[in-house]
Image (tube, rainbow, N blue to C red):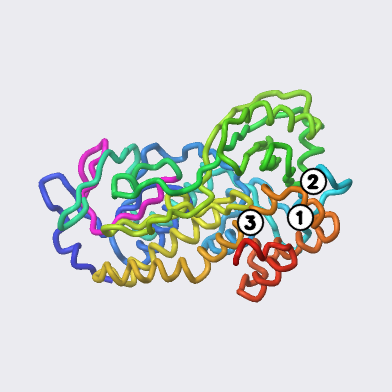
Amino acid sequence: MKSFSKINTFLSFDMKHYDVVVVGSGPAGGMAAYEVAKAGLSVAILEKENLPRYKTCGGGLVFRGREMLPFDISDVIEKEYNDLYIYFDHLDQPLFAKRTYPVVTMVMRDKFDQLIVENAKNLGAELLENHTLKALEFGENIILKSSQGDISSTYIIAADGVLGPTAKYAGWSESRQLIPALEYEVEVPQDVYDRLATEARFDIDVIPKGYGWCFPKKNHLSIGVGTFKKRKINLREHYHAYLKILGIDEILSEQAHGFQVPISPRKDGFVKKNVFLTGDSAGFADPLTAEGITNSLYSGGLAGKAIAQHFNDPTQAEITYVESLNERLLPELKFAGYLAHLFYNQKTIRNYLMKSNGQRYCEKITDIYTGHLELNKDIKDRIIKNLGLGFLVK
């Protein structure tokens, strides 16, 4: 595809012009750049650090997200599990989902993100490392003022995460719901690791209105706690209590990382002035599980495709992106919000339902999150009715 912006590569002596600049090299940014480059447009990935870089994240990639990737990720898989366990403090035994395919694949984000970027680079994308975005100027083109100089672009795809500045620079106000979480990369004695590495697990209610997780990696554990209601809370205290539940009384080393998760989409749109928001920048983390990788991959790919398909018509590119979000992603987030309300704000009702039909619900929800059950209106209405959540959608 040949674009009109390629006629003039340099707008000034030292300012290079790209068809698209993607801000951020995470899953959303990598997939956006991949789709743009695949279409033959010029694209740069603006990254404030040098790759590979550590990224705070549980690193659990559900099967549906893994299936979205158009290339092999075998080299960056730490572990994979065909089953997943969910522990409730009121149940003697955990609920579990077992499949013939990996329900969850464990990755470390430094390697995973770099793999996606390398695949985008193979198609022609440029990686601009050590470039911190300082400001945006809007005119005939968008000028990105970075720590390494100015860059010009026709479109911007914001993929710089929950705290990235691109959305603010482009005129968005904060309307996402952000929740706090704390994660540790933990080394434990071999016998303890061997015991806990047999399963990927969630523990509901080890922290008020939230959960803890223990995700085994190749030679350590990613352990964290998060609450789905923003408030003052001692996450470290709940983390140490969770270690006792896991039976960990000796730690060889640990590294703590606090972060925030956006569990509601922005209320003032996802496109302004040729700037497209994706992933956490848009608020696309799942409100039930707080998992963000899958929706980041998905929304980044959608934004890249929409721009590539309608490069010379920004209005149509925006319409295409928003329509594609409304086709599946936004309705799914709304539905997950209903389930999250039940899980974290209606504990008595939830416990009753989980005790009587928990395994059946676990199976259905697993099929939805792994992409093996299409979440159409009939299925959503049936689940909402069975869970007694009709009052939420009146």
State which mark lies toward you, 2 or 3: 2
The magenta segment is 143-161
What residue is drawn where x is 35% and y is 42%?
165
Tell me if 275 is positioned left or right of 248 in this view: left
Q: What number is the disc on residue 390?
A: none
Residue in front for this viewpoint, 172 or 146: 172
- Residue 341 position in % (x across, y down): 64, 53
Instruction: Write down the residue under mark 3.
Output: 62
Q: Disc 3 marks which amino acid?
A: Val
Instruction: Write down the residue under mark 2.
Output: 88
In this view, 56 is above or below 263: above
Mark 1 secondary-structure assignment: strand
Question: Magenta span has 292?
Answer: no
Instruction: Write down the residue under mark 1.
Output: 83
Q: Earlier in the sequence, mark 2 or mark 3?
A: 3
Prevalent SS, magenta region: strand
Mark 3 secondary-structure assignment: strand
Q: Disc 2 marks which amino acid?
A: Phe
Residue in front for this viewpoint, 287 or 247: 287
Residue in front for this viewpoint, 19 or 212: 212
- Residue 11 position in % (x across, y down): 13, 52
Q: Disc 2 to disc 1, how far (Cα)? A: 17 Å
Q: Disc 1 marks which amino acid?
A: Asp
Mark 1 surroundings within 10 Å by alpha-carbon count, few (fewer than 14), some (14 through 19), many (20 or more): some
In this view, 309 is above or below 57: below
Mark 2 secondary-structure assignment: strand
In this view, 49 is above or below 377: above
Q: Earlier in the sequence, mark 1 or mark 3?
A: 3
Q: In the picture, residue 270 is in which quadrant? A: bottom left
What residue is drawn where x is 45% and y is 44%?
162
State which mark lies toward you, 2 or 1: 2
What residue is drawn where x is 74% and y is 46%?
201
